[in-house]
Image (cartoon, rainbow, N blue to C red):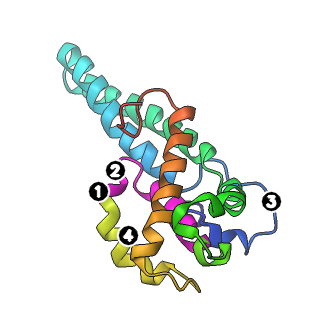
């Protein structure tokens, strides 16, 4: 069950410096499930029309395999270590971070990375209220309230979304780009 646990930037402090897991996080599972459902439905419908229930079953298996491969793409595209390094170097360029330390914003950036892997088929706006509700249990030592932390969380979410979209074909985040 450990391979299903997604890594957050907080976990980076607890690791031995080894490379990130390959397609073992929540992104792989969610991508596999979502792709399996979508691909299975499409392939099953196409084949089901020709061969009935057997075609639908084959379509579901094909969809699950395609979805798992898409999930591996998401897991490989999201590197919490790289995200942490990026935000450490760039947080001062963000208007909301003026006069603050990186340590204050680090949990919010990590939360955005983790949240995207948990909700890859939803938009930030769709899940913002859930994220805000759960922020107090995820904030660690950050003194930021959600009204301040959500800007960094959204930035990290969007950066990961853009990274995943570059790594996978199509408009995976449905933003028209």
Mark 1 in CB contact with mark 4 (< 8 angstroms) = no
Judging by the rendered image, the residue that carries numbered circle 4 is 131
Image location (x, y in percent) of residue 155: 50, 56
Q: Is residue 114 magenta?
A: yes
Q: Which residues are magenta?
A: 106-126
Is residue 9 at least partly visible in the picture? yes
Is residue 34 or residue 46 the one in the foreground? 34
Question: Crowding near pointer 3: few (<14 within 10 Å), some, many (20+)?
Answer: few
Q: Is residue 15 left or right of residue 57?
A: right
44 shown above or below 34: above
48 shown above or below 18: above
Is residue 148 or residue 2 the one in the foreground? 148
> Which disc is residue 53 wearing?
none
Judging by the rendered image, the residue that carries numbered circle 1 is 126
Q: Residue at x 34, y 27 (%)?
A: 58
Q: Is residue 104 magenta?
A: no
Q: CA distance from mark 2 to mark 1?
A: 6 Å
Mark 2 in CB contact with mark 3 (< 8 angstroms) = no
Judging by the rendered image, the residue that carries numbered circle 3 is 18
Q: CA distance from mark 1 to mark 4?
A: 10 Å
Q: CA distance from mark 2 to mark 3?
A: 30 Å
């Amino acid at each position: 069950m450990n391979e299903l646990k997604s890594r957050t930037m907080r976990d980076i402090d607890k690791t031995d410096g080894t490379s990130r897991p390959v397609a073992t996080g929540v992104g792989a599972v969610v991508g596999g499930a979502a792709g399996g459902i979508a691909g299975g439905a499409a392939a099953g419908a196409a084949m089901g029309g020709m061969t009935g229930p057997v075609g639908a079953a084959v379509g579901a298996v094909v969809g699950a395999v395609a979805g798992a491969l898409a999930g591996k793409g998401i897991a490989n595209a999201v590197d919490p270590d790289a995200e942490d390094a990026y935000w450490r170097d760039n947080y001062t360029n963000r208007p909301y971070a003026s006069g603050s330390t990186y340590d204050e914003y680090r949990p919010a950036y990590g939360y955005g990375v983790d949240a995207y892997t948990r909700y890859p088929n939803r938009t930030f706006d769709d899940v913002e209220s859930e994220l805000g509700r759960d922020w107090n249990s995820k904030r660690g030592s950050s003194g930021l309230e959600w009204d301040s932390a959500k800007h960094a969380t959204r930035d990290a979410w969007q950066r990961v979304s853009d990274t995943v979209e570059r790594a996978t074909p199509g408009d995976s985040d449905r933003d028209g780009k």
